[in-house]
Image (spheres, grey):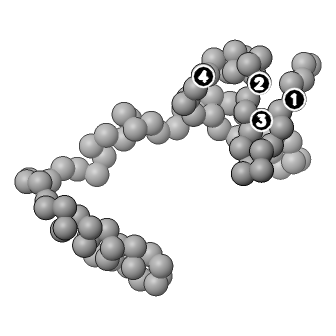
Amino acid sequence: MRSAISTITDDGMVALPPEVQRQLGVGANDPVEWLIDDDGSVRVIRSNGPTLESVRGAAGSLSKPLPWDEVLKIAREDAACVTSGGHGG
């Protein structure tokens, strides 16, 4: 077993040491996943989770573009439902 040391910044960020990045095959802007085992140990792996490209189009598409003020109105309504615990529809 090998070890590598990182420091947690004031805002909770952790940089992966170059050796760990090489082991995982990751670099800048690549997603990693932190796995927390029941025994309290933590593992970091290269994430196979969704990327922007993999979810492109998942929400469908509009038949025509919406005006920006309409987009903002819908976003504010959705945010209000979330903060009030309501269900939008």
Q: Determine which of the numbered discs, if any, sits on residue 17 in the image.
A: 2
Q: Of label 1 and label 3, which has the lower sequence position?
A: 1
Residue that appears at 83% across and 37% down: 7
Q: Of label 2 and label 4, which has the lower sequence position?
A: 2
- Where on the picture, by quarter, is residue 3? top right
Q: Nearer the viewer, mark 1 or mark 3?
A: 1
Disc 1 residue type (three-letter)? Ile
Which residue in the rendered view is the most extreme toward the front?
A: 10
Disc 4 residue type (three-letter)? Gly
Spatial CA distance of label 1 from label 2 is: 7 Å
Q: Of label 3 and label 4, which has the lower sequence position?
A: 4
Q: Are marks 1 and 2 in contact (CB under 8 Å)?
A: yes
**Residue bearing the label numbered 4:** 27
Mark 3: which secondary structure?
strand
Mark 1: which secondary structure?
loop
Which residue in the rendered view is the most extreme toward the left?
A: 64
Q: Are marks 1 and 3 in contact (CB under 8 Å)?
A: no
Q: Determine which of the numbered discs, if any, sits on residue 43 in the image.
A: 3
